[in-house]
Amino acid sequence: MLNPDTRSLYTSALAPPPGMVFDEGIATTFSLDPTTLLSIPVHLALLASNSPDQLSDGIPILEAIRRLAGRITVYAQRGRLQVPGSANVLYGLLERMVCEVRAPRGGQFHPKIWLLRFRDPIDEASPCLRLIVLSRNLTTDRSWDLALRLEGELGPADLPQNRELSDLIKDLPTMTSNHVTEERQAQAERLASELLRTSWVLPPGYRSVSFSVLGRHEGGWRPSRCRRLAVISPFCTDEALRRLARLSSHGSILLSRPETLEAIDDKILDMYEQRYTLAEEAETEDGESADEVASSDMVGLHAKIYAFERGWDTHLVVGSGNATNAALVAASNIEVMAELVGRRSKVGGVDTIFGEDGFGPYLKKFTVQEDRPDVDQEFKEAEQALYIARRQLAAATFKIACNKVEDDGLWLLSLLGDLPVMEGIQNIKAWPITIPEDRSLELIPNETREERKFGPITLAAVTGLIAFELKTDHSGVGARLVLNIEIEGLPEGRDAEIYRAILKNKDEFFRYLLLLLNGDDLGRNWRSDKNGYVAGSWEHRLSNGVGLLEELTRAYSVEPERLENVDKLVRDLMETDGGNSVVTPEFLDLWRVFETALREKDG
């Protein structure tokens, strides 16, 4: 049923089916790492076998985002965008893709799904939808997580088992804190409509799947009674565990983190006949904090699984919901759960999950310590103050204003809006994530000042993605987050300046030109190894005039709009004094032939 030895990469779940190409998609996540998000379009658009090493090569990222920034929308909890490890102007291209969301009932926006649409380049009328229901966020965490991947085709009728999830997708634009364009609203409605009519191909042994969305209305999760129950959840609270245990007539099993179980009331732990944690050697890093109280990074388990034995069947529920009050009882968090049903004789049951072919070899029994360590009350209060302050900052209304510095082509960014008074916070600083942290500003709460200016910075570094660092008076208790803040008067040409910042010489220009001249199938030209990009791809095809002429002619004959992208690139690069060092005179002589042909075609 669930074999921990069967592993998969996050990006492999996004690869298009054979013979199909990516069309559009929506993702939801609690926390989001901008660097991780930069790698996603590369896999969807370029079919790369390996993503670039962080941001060491921005050229494939640049082209992938040019193609897909308007077709991928990521909805994330406001205040949970992570601060990247280093500055890079490429982050500015993510502003349009990221929509920050607030849960309507005061909790956290916590679902973790991908809804992807693929199309056949030949048969446009037969799209394929892929739904991925995860327990992990769109980050670099290396914790124990779980993903359910389903694919299906559209049918003629609405399917009631898809209704709740379809309604959530359709309503996502109404939950955002920043402006959502009409195009992205239409995308949500279009994918929600198709999802409602999709019949899924199920994993072997299962006969049905349905979806529950928690947190949109009053009333928590209400699963039916069962014979046996297994709960796997990294974060738990007393009332949620009590309600779950009461569903079972013949015993329950609980797997969680050791620090979580130590905080649970002994009487509630006794309601579970078997209690486990992961063995120490099986734990890995995880960066998500608990649902209700912010905490430092933890290690180990992050999957959420609920298994119910009812009659001859096993009901396996997976998704984003922890066994906590916020997720299951009060249901203030937005959560997505998928429930698979199959005969126990075919898919296994509770004993299978915790047996030798399941988690068994990676577990150790949990026993309550007689002398539990005293709670550090000051540390706990500092964490609670930080959690409240983080939510206050995320709820604040900010804008970014751009002002050009006279005569030198540089810009100043002003952070407009009042900082809330955040009790227990001793230090606040902020900086755009496109510039180094050492250029950050110290901020004073509840004060509006014109001096809150970042810069001077280049036009390529202008962004609304602003990092904040909060520190409490307790050593080691702090938080870093990014807010996607609306920019008033985003200067024209900002994106073109990002292109110029990445394409710094003629070598990089020709490599990028190859990507522009190719369609969806780019894998044959863009394979990377530890020494860089393999010889014989762009060098062989573009290093001489004959090869370049063939590429341009082929693109003009097959898909002339590709040359329109080349035309825009050349014009953007030539607007600067350094354009001649990037776009060679030899290329310009050849390009004028196609430039004239494009003008005549349009005229």
Image: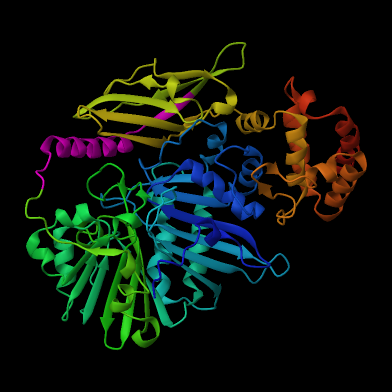
Give the magenta-colored segment's residue range. 373-401
Vertical side of 484 occupied by 521: above or below: below
Q: Is residue 134 magenta?
A: no
Q: Is residue 184 left or right of residue 358?
A: right
Identify the main secondary structure in magenta.
helix
Percent coordinates x, y for residue 60 in the rendering = 65, 44
Total numbered circles: 0
Q: Is residue 488 left or right of residue 502?
A: left
Q: Say which quarter of the image contains residue 301.
A: bottom left
Closest to the observer, 447 or 424: 424
Q: At 56% from the left edge and 47% from the top edge, which residue is drawn?
A: 39
Q: In which quadrant of the rendered image does the N terminus lie?
A: bottom left
Q: Is residue 394 magenta?
A: yes
Q: Is residue 371 left or right of residue 558?
A: left
Percent coordinates x, y for residue 342 in the rendering = 38, 83
- The residue at the far top in this view is 407
Residue 97 showing in the rendered view = no
Vertical side of 246 occupied by 343: above or below: below
Residue 584 showing in the rendered view = yes
Vertical side of 432 occupied by 332: above or below: below
Closest to the observer, 542 or 530: 530
Percent coordinates x, y for residue 293 in the rendering = 22, 45
Q: In which quadrant of the rendered image does the C terminus lie?
A: top right
Vertical side of 264 occupied by 596: above or below: above
